[in-house]
Amino acid sequence: MTKLTHHLVPLLFVAAGLGLSLIGLRPVVADLLILSVYYLLLAGSWNLLAGFAGQYSFAHIGLATAGAYGTAALVIGGGLSGWAALVIMPVAVALLGGGLGLVALRVRGVQLPLITFAFAGAFAVFLAAASDITNGSMGLQLPKLVPGFDRSLYLVLGGILAGLFFIVQNWMIDGKLGLLMQAIRDNEDIAHGMGVGIFRVKIAAFMITAAIAGLAGSFYANYVGVLAPSMLSMGEMGYVVAMAVIGGLGYRYGPLIGVVIIRSIEYFVRGFGAEYTLVIITGVALLVVLFFREGVIAYVSRLMPRQTARWRS
């Protein structure tokens, strides 16, 4: 795929969101697509951090939850609109991610996943314990962007946010930052020897991807309207990681393919055995790891090298 094609993808998502809002989708299908945007933002931002920068953080679902509860605080406590929260929370969560990164990114190897995992776990405990602030497991309610059950606006907004994500991704991957991130991922010591500002690049990647996670959380809060600590479960983080890995970690459209596969499984399984959804997704992830280690996109690229050789770039 050429760079021109990559830069047309955001427009396709915006057009798709607008078109889908006009055709009158069934509520269950509209819900599936709208929440798929939430997972695309999370899986895509995690892929940028882990797949392109080589930083395996498990704080992403915690950062998204911070964006969601921060939105509730602005709307309920601050009297602002959900639209304002969509603008404010990515900046606020980017700063939170930068603060976490100042601590977490000074370590290497297994210590980074452990520190970020501890952050997510501690945040989950806080949300459950601080029931006077968060309403604990009972859930926190906030008004939606649009009263009622009309999902058309959310389909349009979802298309815009998905398009915005791909604009940011293209800017990162195709620019100097993307080259430096991949240099650090491939060999941090050699990158350091060549004069790359390792810590500066890591912090930039961490803050940008944290901002995307915060945007995802704010979008989720504005759409669902009910927040609970279960949003921060490790199962949710596992979904995000599985989406990136199944599609192709380190590939530009890997998370998109992963989201399509996993969300499709959820949709078709719910009719006859929703309780087995996690088991089936885990099985699919194991099959991919065992037989298609670089993900579905890598496997397809080997079958059709001329058409897909540049999907990673």
Image: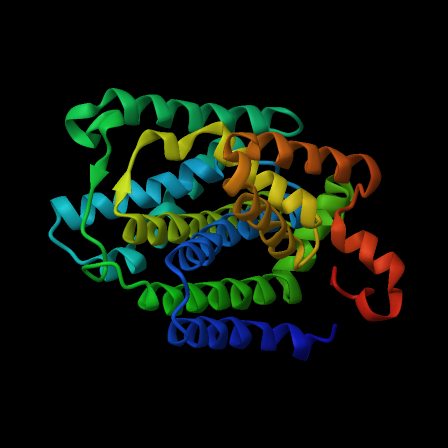
Picture coordinates of residue 197, whole percent (x, y): 62, 48
Residue 105 visible in this rendered orientation of the protein = no
Which of the 4 image quadrants contains residue 63? top left
Who is closer to the viewer here, 182 or 297? 297
Which of the 4 image quadrants contains residue 179? bottom right
Q: Is residue 234 above or below residue 223?
A: above
Who is closer to the viewer here, 100 or 256? 256
Who is closer to the viewer here, 207 or 150? 150
Picture coordinates of residue 86, whole percent (x, y): 30, 58
Picture coordinates of residue 203, whole percent (x, y): 52, 45
**Position of residue 229 in the picture relative to residue 143 (left or right):** right
Q: Which residue is rendered at x = 61% and y = 48% of the image? A: 47
Q: Which residue is rendered at x = 15% and y = 56% of the image? A: 80
Q: Is residue 102 above or below residue 203?
A: above
Picture coordinates of residue 279, whole percent (x, y): 61, 29
Which of the 4 image quadrants contains residue 140? top left
Q: How many dots with numbers?
A: 0
Q: Which residue is rendered at x = 21% and y = 31% of the image? A: 134
Quadrant where the N terminus sits is: bottom right
Q: Is residue 182 above or below residue 54?
A: below
